[in-house]
Image (tube, grey):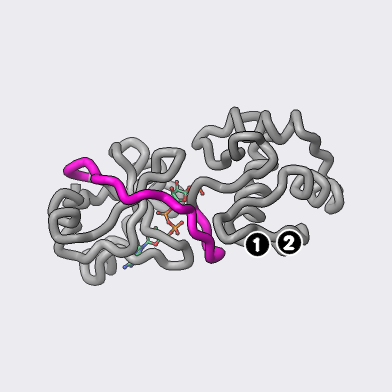
């Protein structure tokens, strides 16, 4: 992603996941906002953007963080929200193991208390260890935790798979977490 696209992606993450009020837009209950309203609102804060630029940010995004609806009148973030939205995802059966990337300083607390969603709507898990390393590197020395998702699923815990391939669940109790 170019520098410009990265900056726009960060702005979209902010307003489509956390603070729509920052540019004066609203998200509906499923996280969608009208594309023309988003474009107008971003221009209003002095950041020039048109439909072609927005499409470029969405389609070249390294994690496919944002998605249009079918007729491209609406846009939303595919996961990562802290505002209260329902993504309307169907429960999915996870692969036997999933991974969570975190930083060394959080490990003791996670092994003690399990994985908490903190400010977001879900705990985020990945299907591969490389992604987990990248996620963990954002906060310090990365540590990969293995989640026994097969046992969790067998015991009635629900998992969702976001449109961009992130596994989501509510809480991972400590007995399902171990160091890689
Ligand atoms: C940690 C990025 C202490 C948890 C990524 C994490 C992801 C605990 C932090 C997405 C804990 C929360 C989400 C406990 C959890 N004690 N620390 N009991 N339970 N934690 O950012 O998973 O680039 O809300 O390990 O790629 O890091 O934004 O979650 O370090 O997919 O698209 O609390 O954000 O995607 O941090 O990242 P976050 P996350 P984007």
Residue 82 drawn in magenta: yes
Q: Name the residue under label 2.
A: 22
Instruction: Classify 162 as above or below 1.
Output: below
Q: What element carries label 2?
A: helix
Residue visible at 62% across and 51% down in the picture: 32
Report the predominant secondary structure element of the magenta stretch: loop
In this orientation, does residue 179 appear?
no
Few, some or many residues within 10 Å of mark 2 (<14, 14–19, 20+) = some
Q: In the picture, residue 178 is in which quadrant?
A: bottom left
Q: Where is residue 41 shown, x and y percent of the image?
A: 80, 51
Q: In which quarter of the image is the N terminus?
A: top right
The front one of 115 and 150 is 150
Q: Where is residue 91 shown, x and y percent of the image?
A: 32, 51
Judge left or right: residue 90 versus residue 51. Answer: left
Q: Is mark 1 on a helix, strand or loop?
A: loop
Instruction: Classify 105 as above or below 36.
Output: below
Furthest residue in direction bottom, as rendered: 113
Determine whether label 2 and label 1 are within 8 Å by CB. yes
Judge left or right: residue 5 versus residue 136. Answer: right
Q: Where is residue 167 shown, x and y percent of the image?
A: 35, 47
Question: Ligand 1 sits in which quadrant?
Answer: bottom left
User: Cβ of disc 2 within 8 Å of ligand 1?
Assistant: no
CA–CA distance in space, label 2 to label 1: 6 Å
Residue range (magenta)? 80-97
Q: Where is residue 57 shown, x and y percent of the image?
A: 65, 34
Judge left or right: residue 93 versus residue 60. Answer: left
Q: Name the residue under label 1.
A: 19
Q: In the picture, residue 117 is in which quadrant?
A: bottom left
Residue visible at 45% across and 53% down in the picture: 88
Residue 106 drawn in magenta: no
């Amino acid at each position: 992603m170019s520098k410009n696209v990265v900056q726009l992606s960060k702005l979209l993450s902010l307003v489509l996941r956390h603070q729509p009020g920052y540019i004066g837009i609203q998200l509906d209950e499923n996280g969608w906002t009208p594309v023309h309203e988003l474009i107008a609102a971003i221009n209003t804060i002095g950041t020039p953007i048109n439909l072609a630029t927005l499409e470029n940010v969405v389609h070249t995004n390294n994690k496919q963080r944002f998605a249009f609806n079918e007729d491209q009148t609406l846009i939303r973030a595919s996961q990562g929200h802290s505002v209260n939205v329902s993504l309307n995802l169907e429960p999915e059966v996870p692969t036997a193991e999933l991974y969570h990337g975190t930083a060394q300083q959080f490990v003791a607390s996670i092994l003690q208390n399990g994985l908490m969603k903190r400010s977001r709507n879900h705990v985020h898990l990945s299907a591969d260890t490389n992604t987990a390393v990248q996620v963990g590197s954002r906060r310090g020395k990365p540590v990969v935790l293995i989640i026994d998702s097969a046992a969790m699923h067998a015991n009635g815990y629900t998992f969702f798979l976001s449109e961009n391939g992130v596994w989501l669940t509510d809480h991972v109790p400590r007995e399902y977490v171990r160091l890689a």
